[in-house]
Amino acid sequence: MTTWQRYVAIGDSFTEGMSDPDPTRPGSYLGWADRLATALSRLAADAGAEFKYANLAVRGRTLSDVVGAQLQAALAMGPDLVSVVGGGNDILRPSVDLDAIAASLDEAVSRIRTTGADVLMATPTDTRDSGLFKPLRPRHAIHTANIFSIAQRHGAHVLNLWGLEAIRDWRMWSEDRIHLSTQGHRRVALAALEALGRHTPEVLDDAWRAPLPPAERALRRDELREHLRWVRTHAAPWVQRRVQGTSSGDHLSAKLPTLVPWPPRDSPPT
């Protein structure tokens, strides 16, 4: 079994780790990729190998940047594992060419595999129970089918978020309803380990798959009040940025732009 020693993550806010605050780095995030890196580091240590990790993902980035500048920088590091998750911001746009997205991802995965590195991709989630996001379900379904086809063609691994029922629960998401909460990121990290064929004791414990116990239904007026607060606080600013052609990550750079020993000594448990 392969022991990965140089893992590079590329993508957008999902891979950057929003909204999973890093208690050791104020203003920064952990997220599923960082947590996955910590687990892979332990496996490398068990095999007597050193492990390094880089995370080039930046919130708001479209697929052209993920498979462009980010991928170029990732390949220059000589990784043996690359997670490439992109296209989510493209899919949110009013008009999107899903075939073009698939073609770009296919070319990117092919480039990575040509170097001998392994690839981890991720499907979008199933928005069946996601209220205002439910109309995205057909796009997410097509993108999911495309990702599995690309992975099969190139021998890549797939993190199947579409089939992870537990994260359909709003309690797995942050207040903005777009990014995973800390608990959501933890579960996704375990799903990623499973996708890579690493059945650690944490993965074998099926608790991470199980949906949360049913929540008490809030009063209708409380639900409406919370929805209006979400619109003012999160939805309206997001729409305004789209109208202006700006992004929350326009002036940000990657949090871990080079391969570094991982995890940091002061890193919290996964």
Image: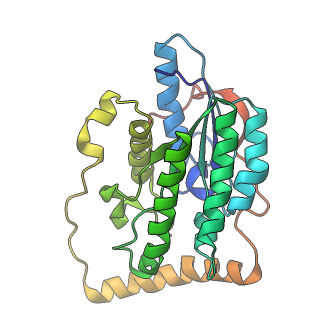
The figure's colour scheme reads rainbow
* Residue 2 on image: x %, y %: 51, 22
- In-image side of 200 versus 104 (left or right): left
The quadrant the N terminus occupies is: top left
Q: Is residue 247 above or below residue 46?
A: below
Residue in view at x 22 percent, y 76 percent:
217
Q: Give 39 or 10, whichever is nearer the viewer.
A: 10
The quadrant the C terminus occupies is: top left
Quarter of the rendering containing residue 86: bottom right
Q: Is residue 253 visible?
A: no
Residue in view at x 49 percent, y 13 percent:
47
Residue in view at x 24 percent, y 51 percent:
210
Residue located farthest toward the top when viewing the structure as drawn:
48
Residue located farthest toward the front when viewing the structure as drawn:
153
Q: Give 164 or 110, whichever is nearer the viewer.
A: 110
* Residue 35 on image: x %, y %: 49, 38
Residue in view at x 45 percent, y 56 percent:
181
Q: Is residue 230 above or below residue 27?
A: below
Q: Is residue 215 above or below residue 30?
A: below
Q: How many numbered discs, if any?
A: 0
Quarter of the rendering containing residue 239: bottom right
* Residue 157 on image: x %, y %: 49, 41
Q: Is residue 70 above or below residue 133?
A: above
Q: Is residue 207 visible?
A: yes
* Residue 190 on image: x %, y %: 39, 40
